[in-house]
Image: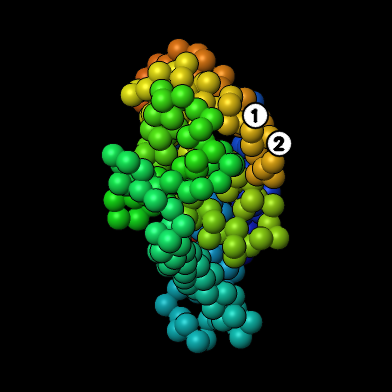
């Protein structure tokens, strides 16, 4: 059982550093053709499996004597130093769940405050009350989830784009709201807030954030012209490149390349494959722990 604990701890370490870096590098090389949904599934599995591995390792170290001495009372079997390990395992589980709930609450409150501010500094767009317009020369477009959702655009963006290009940008933002992409980033934002010193949390958050932009593009292009979408991205990115620290030229290039190519074939096979990999990855730590306890 102690060997199992070391193995699970090593698995947690591998999932916390080399695997995220390798997955991010591989996905960056194939973003122009790969399915972003499959990418998000894999990242979710890496995060959950890493947490399960660490928790299972603590429990394995703590309960090791029980495997070799069946029927003995818990107090008699466990040395005093194993109790803190058991507490750490349970505490980690509580901490992960608590952090996720805290992040969800914080995000909900932040959205509520944001909507209050928007009601003061923006106006509803004519003919589209769910879209708010803010007065600024910067080319901005984003969405605020919650309720029926709100799309926010700037006067600078509206002045920059033609009608068909505006429709493409608005369709992209509406897809973020329809597909609730804010929920996909929730766990990764929670892990990064809890473990900001761990590079893997930032790597995962950035990778998933990029993937959902591509997901929104893929969904929106079903209802708008690809050419108009590309023109809109080109114009907006040129303006953002001059004055935005958050501008990501690599992601913009990937999005334009995908929109300039024919719609990808059915991605169901890649998603099923990613789901199978994810289930296997997440199931490994608890199955090893439970199997060792039962069959030892």
Q: Quadrant of residue 254?
A: top right
Q: Position of residue 280 (x, y in %)?
A: 45, 42
The reply to whether dot 2 and dot 1 touch (C-beta < 8 Å) is: yes
Compared with 116, 47 (above or below) is above
What residue is pinned by disc 2? 242
Q: Quadrant of residue 105?
A: bottom left
- 249 vs 218, left or right, is right
Q: Residue 93 versus residue 266: which sits nearer the camera?
A: 266
Q: CA distance from mark 2 to mark 1?
A: 7 Å
The structure residue drawn at horizontal position 37% and vertical position 22%, both measured from the top left corner, is 224
Q: Position of residue 14 (x, y in %)?
A: 66, 49
What kind of element bears circle 1? helix
What residue is pinned by disc 1? 238
Q: Position of residue 219 (x, y in %)?
A: 38, 29
Residue 215 appearing in the image: no
Q: Residue 218 versus residue 20: which sits nearer the camera?
A: 218
- 163 vs 161, left or right, is left
């Amino acid at each position: 059982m102690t060997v199992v604990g070391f193995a699970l701890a090593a698995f947690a370490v591998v999932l916390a550093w080399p695997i995220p870096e390798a997955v991010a590098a591989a996905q960056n090389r194939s973003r122009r053709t790969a399915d972003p949904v499959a990418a998000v599934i894999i990242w979710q599995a890496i995060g959950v499996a890493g947490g399960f591995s660490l928790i299972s390792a603590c429990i394995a170290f703590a309960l090791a004597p029980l495997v070799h001495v069946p029927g003995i009372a818990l107090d008699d079997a466990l040395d005093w130093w194993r109790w803190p390990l058991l507490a750490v395992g349970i505490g980690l589980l509580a901490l992960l769940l608590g952090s996720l709930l805290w992040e969800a609450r914080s995000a909900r409150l932040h959205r509520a405050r944001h909507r209050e501010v928007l009601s003061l500094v923006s106006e509803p767009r004519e003919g589209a009350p769910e879209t708010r317009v803010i007065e600024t020369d910067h080319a901005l477009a984003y969405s605020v989830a919650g309720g029926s959702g709100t799309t926010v655009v700037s006067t600078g963006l509206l002045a920059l784009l033609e009608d068909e290009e505006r429709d493409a940008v608005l369709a992209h933002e509406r897809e973020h709201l329809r597909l609730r992409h804010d929920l996909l980033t929730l766990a990764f934002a929670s892990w990064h807030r809890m473990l900001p010193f761990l590079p893997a949390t930032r790597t995962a958050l950035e990778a998933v954030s990029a993937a959902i932009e591509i997901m929104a593009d893929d969904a929106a292009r079903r209802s708008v012209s690809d050419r108009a979408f590309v023109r809109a991205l080109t114009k907006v990115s040129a303006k953002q490149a001059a004055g935005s620290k958050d501008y990501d030229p690599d992601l913009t290039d990937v999005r334009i390349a995908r929109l300039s190519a024919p719609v990808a074939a059915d991605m169901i096979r890649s998603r099923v494959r990613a789901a199978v990999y994810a289930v296997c990855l997440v199931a490994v730590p608890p199955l090893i722990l439970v199997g060792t306890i039962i069959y030892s």
